[in-house]
Image (cartoon, rainbow, N blue to C red):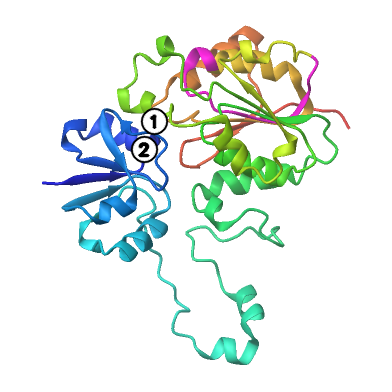
Amino acid sequence: MKIYVFGVGCGAGKLMDSALEPSQVTAFVEERPRADLFLGRPVISPEELARRQVDLLIVTVRDAAGVAARCRELGIGEEKLLFLKNSLVLQDRNSRCDAGEALLGRAYLARLRASQRLIRSPLWTEEELLPEEDLSGDYVRLKTLEAICRDLDEIPGDAAELGVYRGAFARCVNTLLPTRRLWLFDSFEGFDPEESAPFGQGFTEAHRNTSAEQVLALLPHPERAMLRPGLFPRSAEGLEELRFCLVSLDLDLEESTLAGLRWVWPRLSPGGFLLLHDYNNPRLPGVRAALRRYQRELGRALPAVPLCDICGSLILTKERTL
């Protein structure tokens, strides 16, 4: 049986660590392959996939609709597609209403139609600042980010992300805070091998599949980005005077997360926000453990609110006086 896996990121890594052996996969598929191999198996383009026998294509990326459309172009039938993300289909109750556009016009009709999501757009949103391709990935997390960024006008400091991976979240921060410098801390080569050793090979290999150039190419305002490649906290040396209004801390592992908290929290401006990703992620318990350790060091709990986003983020804020 010819089994292919679409994607070579975290979703594919999780699949290989929990369900499949690399030997069961004929090849991995990526739109623009950046490497010839992933976990020792070939990485091919969708065009090459179309020339092969495909018994099953397991889709591990979030853009389920895009991959489905691509497979239709390539003649790969839906019966061969298994989606691991974004597989929920919501019923469009307005799909048969033909009179609306004729009577109201397309633009006005678009304002009236409800978005086809489980969660409706917030009442305070007058216009979507982030594109649908971003919102479809993790709607709760990204709309929370937007709400925070709308409330930072009086808070001084730069923005930062510790743990950038491929830059999808950095792109959203750069979009929402176009006038702020955005400091991006990442090795751009994966985790510290010693710290990530207890985790699966798929997890570690997936996080190597990135580059600083790839991240910069995603940003709408790359001139505002300040890249700091290398392992944290060495990559922050010489930046002790910085202050931040917003920080995304997404380092996954306990010791790295603890180092990030120790460095970032004292530099967070009063009224600023720290977004701690994976706090409630059962696969990455070190994030929660790191915060507990840091709070014990401080001798107090930090003000925080958990989100019900995909990976269980925690939003922390620093008290300020008016």
Q: Quadrant of residue 282?
A: top left
Check residue 206 in the rendering and tell me which mark sits there, or answer none.
Answer: 1
118 in magenta: no
In magenta stretch: residue 246? yes
Q: Are marks 2 and 1 in contact (CB under 8 Å)?
A: yes
**Label 1: element kind:** helix
Q: Is residue 98 above or below residue 246?
A: below
**In the rendered view, would you say 289 is above or below 84?**
above
Could you say where residue 7 lies in the image, as x and y percent from the top left?
36, 42
Q: Where is residue 234 drawn, in percent x and y?
A: 62, 10
Q: Amino acid at mark 2?
A: Val
| Res 237 seen here | yes
Q: Position of residue 185 (x, y in %)?
A: 62, 23
Look at the image and give the residue range highlighted in magenta: 241-256
Instruction: Report crowding for label 2: few under 14, some 14 to 19, many 20 or more residues within 10 A (C-alpha).
Output: many
Q: Within the image, what quadrant is residue 93 found in?
A: bottom left
